[in-house]
């Protein structure tokens, strides 16, 4: 197995393979020992930034110029909003444009990112957490309201059923009472008519006996009842009760039964400024937005890049 590919192999100089090289070229991304760094810096085809190996991760990487591929962008054009090299500044495209050192620009951008991170972690994120924590309580309130509404509707329905049942019982009772009264009247009429029929039958029998007997005395004492019986009883024309009802008006029933007010959703305007003072005094750590010292390390690296002294401790720019 190649020892350089072994997981236990130490870091080596990329030029001479001496173990534990103390330096690192942030542009070429290679490890360098003290002996090889001089030779590496003699390559003037491009810029070299040599930093202590322990600071290799915090060193900013200069972008390559898109127009002049052998140059690195050390400046930033404010009008165009892009990194540019020294040769770009003298060209017509960026002439008279305001430029600043790209490290200063990077430092400003890092400060803006740091401010965004602070705002997200300490102000915006806690508010979203607060809003999210309210949903379980809202669901409980919704369920409780639903149960109360269903209970109220059921109670109203029971009241209506009770009233309707009472109405139905009364109507049935009135029908039975009317039937009983009319049945009693019919029985009385029937009885009177049957009694009259018996009387007529009896008279017919008597008349036949008188005619057959030729009894002068009986014939002389006979008194006719036909005039009395000819007075027929009145004939009643009955109009039976009818059940009449109105068309069921659902809208009217809804108005009488009860209706639901619509669910309203009124958005509340939340101002993050109102939360600044409260959240500023909060000592709770925001786990999701916990961040390390990368920004501070990067800012320190920017200061080190601007110095050029001992290559053991600082950055060497050539």
Image: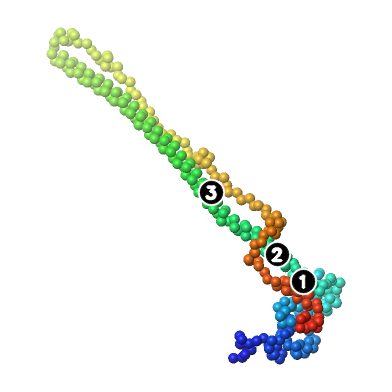
Label 1 sits on a secondary structure element that is: helix
Please name the residue that numbered disc 3 is placed on.
145
Position of residue 125 in the picture relative to residue 65 (left or right): left
Position of residue 156 in the picture relative to residue 181 (left or right): right
Task: Depth check: give the residue in front, 135 or 90.
Answer: 135
Q: Quadrant of the N terminus?
A: bottom right
Q: Where does the image place residue 148, in percent across and percent down from the top left?
A: 51, 47
Q: Dot 1, crowdedness within 10 Å: few (<14), some or many (≥20)?
A: some
Q: Where does the image place residue 143, in percent across and percent down from the top left?
A: 52, 52
Of the numbered discs 2 and 1, the one sitting upstream in the chain is 1
Label 2 sits on a secondary structure element that is: helix
Q: Nearer the viewer, mark 3 or mark 2?
A: 2
**Residue lying at 51% horizontally and 46% vertically, measured from the top left:** 149
Q: Quadrant of the C terminus?
A: bottom right
Residue 269 in view of the camera: yes
Alpha carbons under labels 2 and 1: distance apart: 16 Å
Alpha carbons under labels 1 and 3: distance apart: 55 Å
Please name the residue that numbered disc 2 is placed on.
118
Residues tagged 2 and 1 counted as in contact (Cβ below 8 A) = no
């Amino acid at each position: 197995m190649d020892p350089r590919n072994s997981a236990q192999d130490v870091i080596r100089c990329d030029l001479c393979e001496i173990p534990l090289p103390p330096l690192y070229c942030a542009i070429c991304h290679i490890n360098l020992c003290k002996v090889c760094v001089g030779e590496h810096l003699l390559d003037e085809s491009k810029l070299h930034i040599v930093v202590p190996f322990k600071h290799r991760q915090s060193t900013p990487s200069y972008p390559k110029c898109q127009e002049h591929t052998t140059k690195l962008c050390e400046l930033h054009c404010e009008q165009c909003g892009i990194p540019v090299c020294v040769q770009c500044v003298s060209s017509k495209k960026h002439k008279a444009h305001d430029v600043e050192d790209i490290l200063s620009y990077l430092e400003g951008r890092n400060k803006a990112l740091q401010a965004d991170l602070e705002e997200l972690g300490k102000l915006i994120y806690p508010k979203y957490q607060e809003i999210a924590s309210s949903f379980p309580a809202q669901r409980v309130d919704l369920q409780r309201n639903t149960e109360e509404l269903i209970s109220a509707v059921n109670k109203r329905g029971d009241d209506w059923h009770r009233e309707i049942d009472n109405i139905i019982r009364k109507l049935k009772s009135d029908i039975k009472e009317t039937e009983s009264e009319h049945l009693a009247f019919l029985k009385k009429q029937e009885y009177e008519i049957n009694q009259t029929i018996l009387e007529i039958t009896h008279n017919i029998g008597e008349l036949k006996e008188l005619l057959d007997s030729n009894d002068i005395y009986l014939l002389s004492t006979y008194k006719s009842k036909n005039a009395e019986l000819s007075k027929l009883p009145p004939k009643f024309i009955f109009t039976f009760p009818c059940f009449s009802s109105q068309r069921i008006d659902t809208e009217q029933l809804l108005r009488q039964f009860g209706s639901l007010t619509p669910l309203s959703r009124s958005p509340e305007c939340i101002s993050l400024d109102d939360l600044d003072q409260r959240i500023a005094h909060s000592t709770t750590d925001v786990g999701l937005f916990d961040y390390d010292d990368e920004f501070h390390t990067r800012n320190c690296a920017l200061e080190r890049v601007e110095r050029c002294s001992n290559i053991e401790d600082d950055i060497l720019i050539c």
